[in-house]
Image: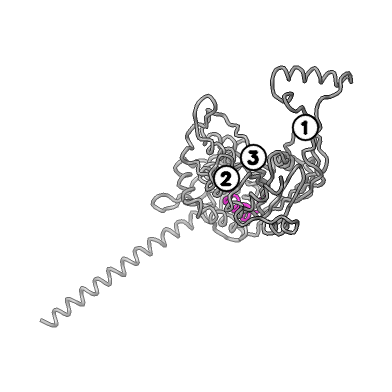
Amino acid sequence: MDASASLRGSMRGNSSSVWRNSGMDVFSRSARDEDDEEALKWAALEKLPTFDRLRKGLLFGSQGAAQEIDVNNLDYQDKKKLIERLVKTTEEDNEKFLLKLRDRLDRVGIDLPTIEVRYEHLNIEAETYVGSRALPSFSNFAMNAVEGVLNTLHILPSRKKHLNILRDISGIIQPCRLTLLLGPPSSGKTTLLLALAGRLDSELKTTGRVSYNGHGVEEFVPQRTSAYISQHDLHIGEMTVRETLEFSGRCQGVGTRYEMLAELSRREKAANIKPDPDVDIYMKAAATEGQEASVVTDYVLKLLGLEVCADTMVGDEMFRGISGGQKKRVTTGELLVGPASALFMDEISTGLDSSTTYSIVNSLRQYVHILKGTAFISLLQPAPETYNLFDDIVLIADGQIVYQGARENVLEFFESMGFKCPDRKGVADFLQEVSL
């Protein structure tokens, strides 16, 4: 009896061990088969011509299996799932996603281009009516037209007032550093941002020089390199938020993304490097004409927290649409979907709560530091947490630069001038008051 019992026990033990071992072999073999299948599919993609290779990638489905897909055939659900895998939570995953993009470029030795913006002895003057004559009324329009003719014939002297908006200012906006522009109202912040972005009104009298990497703005088209985000929300009310961003993305195009992707793909093929499939699909869709508007739009909607109102009409004075804070974020997103490397942003926090402003500025900070962008942002009264995200500060008052330098040194500079910031007051509020 003892011998038979021990025999049955050993058989049960051997059968259970065989089951465990065979089960482990089945699962490991299944994983190996999936990896081998994915490697074969990627090898097949690598053999395609460059034009076809830049339009195709491996997309993982709900079961985890990878399938070859053309980025032109990505549907709404595929793009949504792709963005969810890349940036599930904006506060935590956006930096990881940008680091993946940067790491892919660094592995093959591609250095991202940077833009350094300089302004030297910049003077901007205007001749304009003031007071009631500056109001846009019919009577003023008729009087201005008549006076313009009489002024041209030298019969009547001009009644316009001469205004100095910016007075002989110079400075540098460095790449990879987030720069904050502070100043009281009517100090010339908007005019400075417009001048650096190459969008000044032609009627203004401008002297001095603005250059990008040593090239004056008259030598190229700065609007293709820079993006100016206005403090005024001007949208087509009948379009939804998604349609507004997609239209803006299609108008701006892909810039140099396609050329960079082609060089990246060539170097990875030569070095036998297999990129992250999700990052590869995103970069190929972002560099393909017609698709960049959709996949980048989904990313920007996620980044700015506009997913909840993506399919809601923007609205205007005639019918109700999204809220004022959401419109401000749409204004910011309209230019973030483009390929511009230099961002000039004017009062992007108006109508936003402090937490939303912090989230947007933090995302811009990650972009600037990781992807070597250039950003010059004007804020009226940023919260201390938002203020601490910036690297450099430019303080302007009455058309002149009061301070430009590192954020850590601004209090020391004003203390040496006899102005000490009280402990109870935020640094940004102190700088606004001391410049009045």
Residue 351 pos. (x, y %): 56, 39
Residue 334, x across and y down, in percent: 59, 38
Tag of residue 229? 3
Q: What is the quadrant of residue 216 in the picture?
A: top right
User: If you read the primary sequence from the N terminus, does the residue marked by circle 3 or circle 1 appear first?
Assistant: 1
Cα distance in 3D space between marks 3 and 1: 19 Å
Q: Which residues are magenta?
A: 361-374
Is 41 displayed left or right of 218 in the figure? left
Q: Residue at position x 72%, y 37% from top?
A: 199
Discs 2/1, front: 1
Q: How is the image coloured?
A: one colour
- Determine which residue is flagged by label 2: 286
> In the drawing, what numbered circle is on residue 400?
none
* Element class at badge 2: helix
Residue type of the residue flagged with mark 2: Ala
What is the distance, in whole Å, between disc 2 and disc 1 at their CAs? 35 Å
Q: Secondary structure at mark 1?
A: loop
Mark 1 lies on residue:
202
Residue at the outermost left position: 1
Residue drawn 83% across the image and 40% down it: 207
Say which amino acid is labelled 3: Ile
The stretch drawn in magenta includes residue 363:
yes
**Which amino acid, by three-letter code, is at mark 1?**
Ser
